[in-house]
Image: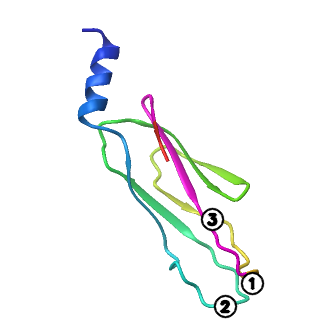
Amino acid sequence: MDLSDYAALVADKYPFGISSFSSNKSSVIEVSTTPITPVLTWNYKNEKHIVTEQKVTSGSTTKTVSVGTETLTWDPIDISSHKTISFKLTAKADEGEKI
């Protein structure tokens, strides 16, 4: 068996995935003129895959997060516009990708 066959077997038995992705701020925030600074945290469901890249996106801004870090403090956000703020985590491990 060559190494690519072994990698495929490991990926089948231990699939890579994101088990949690959350913010320290609740999903409903009362009207305020004070900017918020979300702290995002996440975990992976399988440590058998080596994470090679992590990015968090909100709107048109994408930030690359150092491998080995599973937290990111976002820039302060002005919430007076009453817009919905969404974040997306994209992570790559070995040869897989999960969003």
Helix, strand or loop status at disc 1: loop
Q: Nearer the viewer, mark 2 or mark 3?
A: 2
How far across and how far down the image is residue 26, in percent? 50, 79
How far across and how far down the image is residue 41, in percent? 46, 62
Seen in the image, is 33 located left or right of residue 46? right
Residue 18 on the magenta span: no
| Image-quadrant location for residue 49 | top left
| Label 2 with label 3: CB-CB less than 8 Å | no
Residue 85 on the magenta span: yes
Q: Nearer the viewer, residue 48 or 16?
A: 16
Q: Which residues are magenta?
A: 82-96
Residue at 43% x, 58% y is 42
| Image-quadrant location for residue 57 | bottom right
Mark before the other along the chain sequence, 2 or 3: 2
Which disc, if any, is residue 80? Answer: 1
| Label 2 with label 1: CB-CB less than 8 Å | yes
Which residue extends farthest top? Answer: 1
Residue that badge 3 annotates: 74
Q: Nearer the viewer, residue 45 or 70?
A: 45
**Around disc 1, counting alpha carbons within 10 Å, would you say few (fewer than 14), some (14 to 19), or many (20 or more)?**
few
Residue at 39% x, 35% y is 50
* Amino acid type, mark 3: Trp
In this picture, is 99 found above or below 34? above
In 3D space, how far apart are the residues under numbered discs 1 and 3 (Cα atoms)?
17 Å
Residue at 31% x, 23% y is 8
**Around disc 2, counting alpha carbons within 10 Å, would you say few (fewer than 14), some (14 to 19), or many (20 or more)?**
few
In this picture, is 30 found above or below 73? below
Helix, strand or loop status at disc 3: loop
In this picture, is 8 found above or below 30? above
Which disc, if any, is residue 31? Answer: 2
**Around disc 3, counting alpha carbons within 10 Å, would you say few (fewer than 14), some (14 to 19), or many (20 or more)?**
some
Q: Nearer the viewer, mark 1 or mark 3?
A: 1
